[in-house]
Image (cartoon, rainbow, N blue to C red):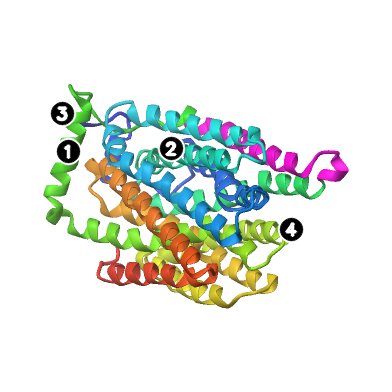
């Protein structure tokens, strides 16, 4: 069994040092996938589908806080499924040719079930939730291998830049299909279609956008580091996972970061997934909510790039801490908002740090892991991230259902950010 580099740039990749010159075709293609799949994040996870779900569930007679709780539980179920699968998927992706093959499988599931959201009738809200869960499994599963491809397309000294640019262009790319969808929904009567049909068109637009702009990654990005195929790959993958866990003390700083990441990224993920449902619960109209979410995507672009620049001066770790402090304030502020103007302020605060904290977490991790185990450790990174996404929505849903008020749930999210920040403080800045 051996780990290989299949490019002529073996010296550059092995030393993790590349010149800070022009962006390569591999880096551009990797960035383009953020442009592609971010349409799913804003349209399906954050904005239009949650609003459509609230419409369907309300017509079915569900109370607001109960339907919000069910939506949180749906996110929890989807995340739990991919979290259980992720450890094995990550190690299987180490084998030669498997990373691209597994990526394509989950990408296909995600795109297909995103499109299939459009065939669900309005009275079948439970089928809508089922298709959402399946599309999210595809989306999250593909991201396991997309994130791991970062070590294949660039070097350590370029990771912050490439990771941040990916998130930044993801925000801009997502606004194009999202804006088109909003216009179709807003002017459905003038176009001559039903409002329900306009939402369904938005789901199809998202699936097409995601599918088409994934082509550059599929065509140009290759698995650079890999392990030779061996007999019983599943058994050997499990063995390698167990070996890494047994020798956890040798990688203590890596797993401490993953523990911190587990908590604070759970808070970030919960805010992303519950933003639309929360806005409706405090009385925002659909038009206001969609406009706010659109501007948030646009505003996130320069802030993501700003985090990348500041990380060159203050380090990735310090900028992650800054984002955590901002998110704690966001949660406290969210408790008392009751108007569209205050929700605007809240959304812009989220825009200021959402891309930065995610992009720098990914690149910070890429710089502290052993290069020859990069795929395996990115598997752990995604495991922790996916498991983290279970707890926040579950806490949010339970507090919302028990207290009868969604605003009370924000204090459970504050605890996640505080815990993550405390653990992160014990780690050194990356070198």
The residue pinned by badge 2 equals: 142
Measured Cα–Cα span from mark 4 to mark 3: 57 Å
**Do the residues under discs 2 and 3 have CB atoms within 8 angstroms?**
no
Tag 3, which secondary structure? loop
Tag 4, which secondary structure? helix
Residue at (45% x, 68% y) in the render: 323
The residue pinned by badge 3 equals: 1
Ranked by sequence position, the earlier of labels 2 and 1 is: 2
Tag 1, which secondary structure? helix
How many other residues sit within 10 Å of disc 3, few (<14), some (14-19) or many (≥20)?
A: few
Specify the quadrant of the image occupied by residue 275.
Answer: bottom right
The span picked out in magenta is 188-217
377 on left or right of 219 = left
Residue at (33% x, 26% y) in the render: 97
Q: Position of residue 383 (x, y in %)?
A: 32, 47
Q: Position of residue 261 (x, y in %)?
A: 34, 59
**Do the residues under discs 2 and 1 have CB atoms within 8 angstroms?**
no
Measured Cα–Cα span from mark 1 to mark 4: 51 Å
Q: For residue 198: magenta? A: yes
């Amino acid at each position: 069994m051996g780990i290989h580099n299949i490019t002529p740039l073996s010296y550059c990749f092995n030393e993790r040092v590349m010149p800070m010159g022009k962006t390569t075709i591999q880096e551009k293609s990797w960035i383009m996938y953020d442009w592609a799949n971010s349409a799913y994040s804003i349209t399906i996870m954050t904005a239009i589908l949650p609003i459509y779900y609230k419409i369907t569930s309300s017509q079915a007679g569900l109370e607001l806080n109960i339907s919000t709780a069910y939506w949180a539980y749906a996110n929890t179920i989807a995340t739990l499924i991919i979290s259980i699968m992720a450890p094995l998927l990550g190690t299987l992706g180490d084998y030669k040719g498997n990373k691209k093959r597994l990526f394509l499988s989950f990408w296909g599931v995600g795109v297909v079930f995103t499109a299939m959201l459009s065939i669900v009738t309005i009275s079948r809200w439970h089928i809508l939730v089922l298709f959402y869960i399946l599309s999210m499994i595809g989306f999250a599963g593909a991201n396991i291998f997309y994130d791991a491809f970062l070590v294949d397309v660039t070097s350590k000294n370029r990771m912050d830049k490439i990771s941040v640019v990916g998130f930044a262009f993801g925000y801009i790319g997502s606004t194009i299909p999202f804006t088109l969808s909003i216009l179709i929904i807003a002017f459905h009567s003038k176009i001559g279609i039903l409002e329900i049909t306009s939402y369904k068109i938005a789901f199809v637009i998202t699936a097409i956008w995601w599918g088409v702009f994934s082509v550059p990654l599929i065509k140009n990005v290759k698995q650079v580091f890999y392990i030779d195929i061996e007999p019983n790959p599943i058994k050997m993958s499990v063995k390698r996972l167990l070996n890494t866990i047994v020798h956890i003390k040798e990688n203590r700083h890596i797993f401490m970061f993953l523990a911190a990441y587990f908590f604070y990224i759970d808070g970030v993920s919960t805010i992303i997934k519950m933003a639309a449902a929360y806005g409706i619960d405090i009385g925002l109209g659909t038009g206001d909510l969609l406009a706010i979410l659109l501007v948030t995507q646009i505003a996130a672009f320069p802030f993501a790039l700003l985090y990348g620049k500041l990380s060159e001066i203050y380090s990735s770790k310090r900028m992650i801490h800054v984002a955590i402090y901002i998110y704690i304030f966001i949660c406290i502020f969210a408790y008392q908002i009751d108007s569209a103007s205050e929700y605007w302020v809240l959304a812009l605060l989220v825009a200021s740090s959402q891309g930065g904290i995610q992009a720098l977490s990914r690149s910070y991790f890429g710089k502290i892991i052993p290069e020859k185990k990069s795929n395996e450790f990115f598997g752990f990174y995604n495991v922790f991230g996916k498991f983290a996404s279970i707890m926040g929505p579950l806490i949010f849903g339970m507090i919302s259902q028990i207290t009868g008020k969604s605003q009370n749930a924000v204090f459970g999210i504050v605890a996640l950010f505080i815990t993550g920040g405390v653990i992160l403080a014990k780690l050194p800045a990356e070198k």
